[in-house]
Image (cartoon, rainbow, N blue to C red):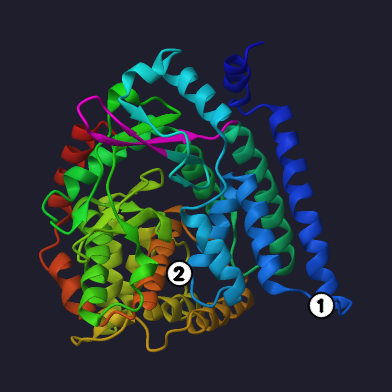
């Protein structure tokens, strides 16, 4: 069996591949876990900087969904100690890459043995490496700069194995905390993660976003190159940019412009087309040379919503603003929440008011009164406790990515300490909202991109 054939076989979600994955995860994490336990229970001195670096190396070497969890945790202020957050943040775009033998086999497998002749230049060293694939710089003969994203081997097995472990973790969690049923959350995450393995689908999503954001001068989307792309290789135009975290200490006007660009990049597609980018971690956007506009990257986790769901998001805002609880119940039910009693309504509204608060007042303000993520964690803890008393709730699948996007973007705005009139930005998108118009736009955009 040749290397190329072996690699192609290993990319299927085989049972042996899942067994290897479970062993990988257990082996990589066991030593680190023992060290942490020793520090906590035996008084063994732990060098947090060193341990955090080892944790980054272990998770980075594993690739796949486990790394995505680390990326999300690193995004949220105060979710982790500073030493760990700083190390894991580097996984956003600087994870340990696969070596040249893998790259050569992967490119040959996808484009054929003469693949090098299709490029004027192809860099052997990865420019970026993340959870499911790594990116290499390249050029066409005419000088066009490219980014070639290669999917790591055996990712289907890794995702299946990690999802099995996630399901087990969820089941154990629910034995001790019945506040939130994880069934639909698991279903949503499973479907989105498996979609991320299909780079042909991601190329369509990239075209969709280029169309939806065509009138947004401060948001830039790369262009896919279909002739050099496959299901496991995505070739696109290269966009120069710097990490957003490099701008945390920039002048306020710079930070505000970047925050506004981010707001438009996520919410113009949602309120005008019913589409959301569900992965707002820090590796998925960069800042352009003008320090006012951004590059939006990585379109593997894209969710399309029915217009009624988007209408429900707007209805809940108006319900909270006007203290109209009948409209609030209608909004939650349009999302997919079931049996919304008065008691459940009051609890859900605690979290909703936290998320909607910056949109309520017509004034310039930060996204949150404090720069710490602990306030949000405290609110979430209160809500969880009250939900448990009621016997729990089963969040609808559609709610998962919208909530994740809101929290993720809020974290970005907190990092930037942006001061913006969020109320006016929001109203500019919803004041003339019409479900029929959204339906027409959505259908046309999806048809043009080929995304279903």
Which residue is rendered at x = 75% and y = 54% of the image?
Answer: 29
Give neighbour class at mark 2: few <14, some 14-19, many 20+ (Cα, 10 Å).
some
Question: In the rendered structure, which segment of residues is drawn in magenta?
Answer: 136-153
C-alpha span from label 1 to label 2: 50 Å
Q: Say whether residue 245 is left or right of residue 12.
A: left
Q: Which residue is mark 2?
A: 340
Displayed quadrant of residue 51: bottom right
Which residue is rendered at x = 71% and y = 51% of the image?
Answer: 168
Q: Say whether residue 241 is left or right of residue 403.
A: left
- Which quadrant of the rendered structure holds the N terminus? top right
Q: Height in image: 373 above or below 278? A: below
Q: Which residue is mark 1?
A: 45
Q: Height in image: 177 above or below 108? A: below
Give how far across and how far down residue 119 sits, in percent.
Answer: 32, 24
Give how far across and how far down residue 227 sits, in percent.
Answer: 29, 21
If you read the primary sequence from the N terminus, does the residue marked by circle 1 or circle 2 appear first?
1
Foreground mark, 1 or 2? 1
Q: Secondary structure at mark 2?
A: loop
Displayed quadrant of residue 322: bottom left
Q: Height in image: 352 above or below 139? A: below
In the foreground, 80 or 113: 113
Q: Secondary structure at mark 1?
A: loop
Give how far across and how far down residue 184 sits, in percent.
Answer: 53, 52
Give neighbour class at mark 1: few <14, some 14-19, many 20+ (Cα, 10 Å).
few
Using the rendered image of the protein, determine whether residue 393 is visible from the camera's viewpoint.
no
């Amino acid at each position: 069996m040749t290397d190329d054939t072996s690699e192609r076989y290993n990319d299927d979600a085989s049972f042996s591949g899942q067994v290897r994955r479970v062993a990988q995860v257990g082996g990589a994490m066991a030593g680190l876990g023992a060290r942490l336990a020793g520090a906590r229970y035996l008084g063994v001195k732990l060098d947090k900087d060193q341990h955090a670096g080892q944790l980054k190396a272990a998770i980075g070497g594993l690739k796949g969904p486990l790394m995505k969890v680390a990326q999300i945790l690193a995004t949220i202020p105060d979710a982790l100690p500073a030493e760990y957050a700083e190390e894991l943040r580097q996984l956003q775009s600087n994870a340990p890459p696969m070596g040249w033998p893998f790259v050569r086999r992967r490119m040959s497998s996808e484009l054929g043995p003469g693949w090098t002749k299709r490029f004027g230049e192809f860099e052997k060293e990865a420019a970026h490496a993340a959870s499911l694939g790594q990116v290499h710089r390249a050029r066409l003969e005419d000088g066009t700069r490219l980014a070639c994203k290669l999917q790591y081997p055996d990712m289907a097995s890794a995702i299946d194995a990690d999802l099995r472990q996630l399901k087990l973790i969820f089941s154990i969690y629910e034995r001790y905390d019945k506040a939130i049923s994880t069934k639909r959350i698991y279903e949503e995450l499973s479907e989105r993660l498996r979609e991320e393995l299909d780079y042909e689908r991601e190329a369509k999503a990239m075209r969709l976003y280029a169309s939806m954001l065509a009138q947004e001068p401060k948001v830039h989307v790369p262009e896919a190159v279909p002739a050099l792309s496959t299901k496991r290789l995505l070739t696109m135009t290269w966009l120069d940019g710097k990490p957003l975290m490099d701008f945390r200490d920039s002048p306020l006007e710079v930070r505000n412009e970047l925050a506004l660009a981010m707001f438009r990049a996520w919410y113009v597609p949602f309120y005008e087309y019913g589409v959301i980018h569900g992965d707002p971690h820090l590796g998925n956007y960069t800042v352009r040379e003008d320090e006012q506009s951004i590059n939006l990257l990585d379109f593997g986790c894209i969710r399309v919503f029915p217009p009624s769901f988007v209408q429900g998001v707007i209805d809940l805002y108006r319900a909270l603003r006007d203290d109209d609880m009948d409209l609030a119940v209608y909004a939650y039910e349009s999302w997919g929440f079931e049996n919304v009693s008065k008691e459940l309504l009051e609890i859900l509204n605690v979290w909703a008011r936290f998320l909607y608060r910056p949109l309520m007042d017509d004034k310039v303000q930060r996204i949150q009164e404090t720069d710490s993520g602990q306030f949000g964690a405290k609110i979430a803890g209160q809500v969880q406790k009250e939900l448990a008393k009621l016997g729990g709730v089963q969040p609808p699948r559609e709610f998962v990515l919208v909530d994740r996007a809101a929290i993720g973007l809020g974290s970005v705005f907190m990092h930037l300490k942006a001061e913006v009139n969020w109320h006016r930005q929001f109203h500019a998108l919803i004041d003339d909202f019409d479900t029929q118009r959204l339906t027409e736009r959505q259908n046309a955009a999806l048809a043009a991109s080929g995304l279903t």
